[in-house]
Image (tube, rainbow, N blue to C red):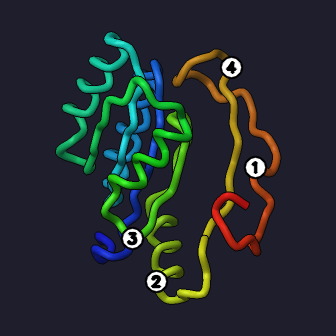
Amino acid sequence: MRPEEDTRVAILVPTKDRSEFVGRLLKYYASVKSPHTLYIGDASQDFHLEQTKEAIARFSEHVSIFHFSWGDLSTHETMARLAEEATETYCAFIGDDDFLVSESLTKCAKFLKSNPDYRTAQGKALLFKLEESGPYGKIDGHGGVYWDRKESHWATARE
């Protein structure tokens, strides 16, 4: 079931020279039929930029993807620009090697829509590592708590 238009989430992803991770990310979101839109800010050089474009072409009929080539921006500048490009009410920032559960994003957006006094919503995280470097391989184990903050009382994003 697709969420309502106003509970879709913009997933903002900065990347640089890691097309294999971006390809894995797109494959995941396509495989779960994610209704959320991916915004990719790409600072990659030619080879990785082309590989990412090929992956986008493979998965773009299954998931909504916007791709921007911004080789001159830092990660923080890229995230800010992606947020400006996003048209969804809600957004989430992730690394090119992270995954968010689509149904959980929808739940978070519905919660925020129903509770306008809240600024953020989040779930739990699981860290895992692979036996070898790169985006694929056998899982070697998992780590502890990734983010243990239950709430935010800060007044600004900078805080």
Figure check: 129 above or below 49:
below
Task: Name the one closer to the observer, 84 or 132.
Answer: 84
Q: Nearer the viewer, mark 2 or mark 3?
A: 3
Q: Tell me if residue 23 can be seen.
A: no
Q: CA distance from mark 4 to mark 1?
A: 20 Å
Q: Earlier in the sequence, mark 3 or mark 4?
A: 3
Disc 4 vs disc 2: Cβ atoms closer than 8 Å? no
Q: Which mark is residue 89?
A: 3
Q: Quadrant of the N terminus?
A: bottom left
Residue 29 falls left or right of residue 137: left
Q: Which mark is residue 146?
A: 1
Task: Name the one closer to the observer, 142 or 74.
Answer: 74
Disc 2 vs disc 3: Cβ atoms closer than 8 Å? yes
Q: CA distance from mark 3 to mark 4?
A: 38 Å
Disc 3: CA contacts within 10 A as few (<14), some (14-19) or many (>=20): some
Could you tell me the amino acid type at mark 4? Answer: Glu
Disc 4: CA contacts within 10 A as few (<14), some (14-19) or many (>=20): few
Q: Secondary structure at mark 3?
A: loop
Q: Earlier in the sequence, mark 4 or mark 2?
A: 2
Q: Earlier in the sequence, mark 3 or mark 1?
A: 3
Disc 3 vs disc 1: Cβ atoms closer than 8 Å? no
* Residue at screen point 60% across, 75% down: 119
Q: Which residue is mark 2?
A: 113
Could you tell me the amino acid type at mark 3? Answer: Thr
Q: Which residue is mark 4?
A: 131
Q: CA distance from mark 2 to mark 3?
A: 9 Å
Figure check: 60 above or below 46:
below
Task: Name the one closer to the observer, 67 or 99.
Answer: 67
Q: CA distance from mark 2 to mark 1?
A: 26 Å
Q: Secondary structure at mark 2?
A: helix
